[in-house]
Image (spheres, grey):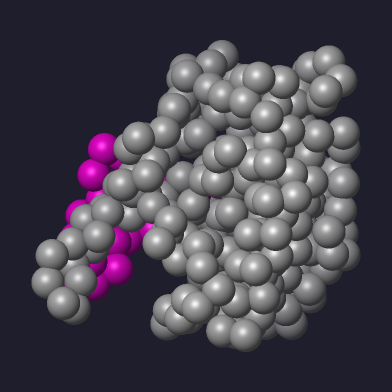
Amino acid sequence: MSDHGPQRLYLFPLSYTDVPLPTGGTMSMVNGCYLIVTGSGQHILIDSGWPPEQPIPAGMPPRQQEHSLLSHLATIGLTPGGITTVICSHFDIDHVGTHDLFPHAEFIVQRKQLEVANNGHPRFASGNAHWGNPALRYRVVEGDTVLMLGIHLIETSGHAPGHQSVLVELPQAGPVLLAIDAVMMERQFTTDRRAWSMDDNEEQLRASTQKLLDLVERHGVRLVVFGHDGAQWQQLTTAPAYYG
């Protein structure tokens, strides 16, 4: 791996929520985002979490252990002005809530996601003030894309049109797959999974899951980070520590 490629990967847990299950008990869910630091000094943010003004939806339990993205950045000596790039997995409100804090960054999004959102899909309307801020500069990609040496964008529609996951190749940890919402929970990482109510297309969801399973085998991925799996995240290395 080149010294100019990814050198550090930070996981930023923003909050945890114990969500009640219809069958009884609870499921731990995390809301978080990610930061890649490259050897050439670039700071690449992936998603940005809930907007600070967003109320907790009616009937949902309170979020726990809340940390803002800005406080996470501060612990590693960064301010919003230090972010060079923001990779947008998709435009759901819990992934775009502070995009507008980074007007100097370049935003990377799949064409399909940007077009659907810009065409007024109601699912993405609540976050429009953040992802649709006219000060933001977008670079559109289409399909699987090598963003730079060691950072691969993987088109994984199904949860949302034009959702993208990210494969990061690190010098010691090796390839790490950030599945994000293509596979939210570890137990869903199987092709016989069923869509949840917030998923867009079950057939595409299963195809994207198979695509990621094949990628894990092909690249020898030892770590897959599932986007909302609170139980997994509590066992992972999180900021200010990092994977290198």
Residue at 44%, 27% (x, y): give it: 237
**Is 176 in front, or is 30?**
176
Res 222 visible: yes
Q: 205 or 85, which lies in front? A: 205
- Quarter of the image for the C terminus: give it: top right
Query: Picture coordinates of residue 53 (x, y %)?
Result: 39, 53
Characterize the magenta stretch by its predominant secondary structure: loop
Give above or below for 209 relative to 1: below
Q: Position of residue 196 (x, y in %)?
A: 43, 79
Tell me if residue 52 is in the magenta stretch.
yes
Left or right relative to 78: residue 25: left
Q: Is residue 206 above or below residue 140?
A: below
The residue located at (56%, 14%) in the rendering is: 77
- 141 or 105, which lies in front? 141
**Magenta includes 98?**
no
What residue do we see at 62% from left, 26% from top? 173
Query: Magenta part of the protein: which range?
Result: 48-66
Q: Is residue 70 left or right of residue 40?
A: left
> Where is residue 19, by image quadrant?
bottom left
Please give the name of the residue rendered at 53% of the width and 22% of the height, measured from the top-left corner.
242
- Image quarter where the N terminus lies is top right
Among all residues in the image, which is located at the extreme left? 24
Percent position of residue 87, x then y: 71, 47
> In the rendered view, would you say 201 is above or below 143?
below
Q: Position of residue 29 (x, y in %)?
A: 33, 55
Q: Is residue 100 visible?
A: no
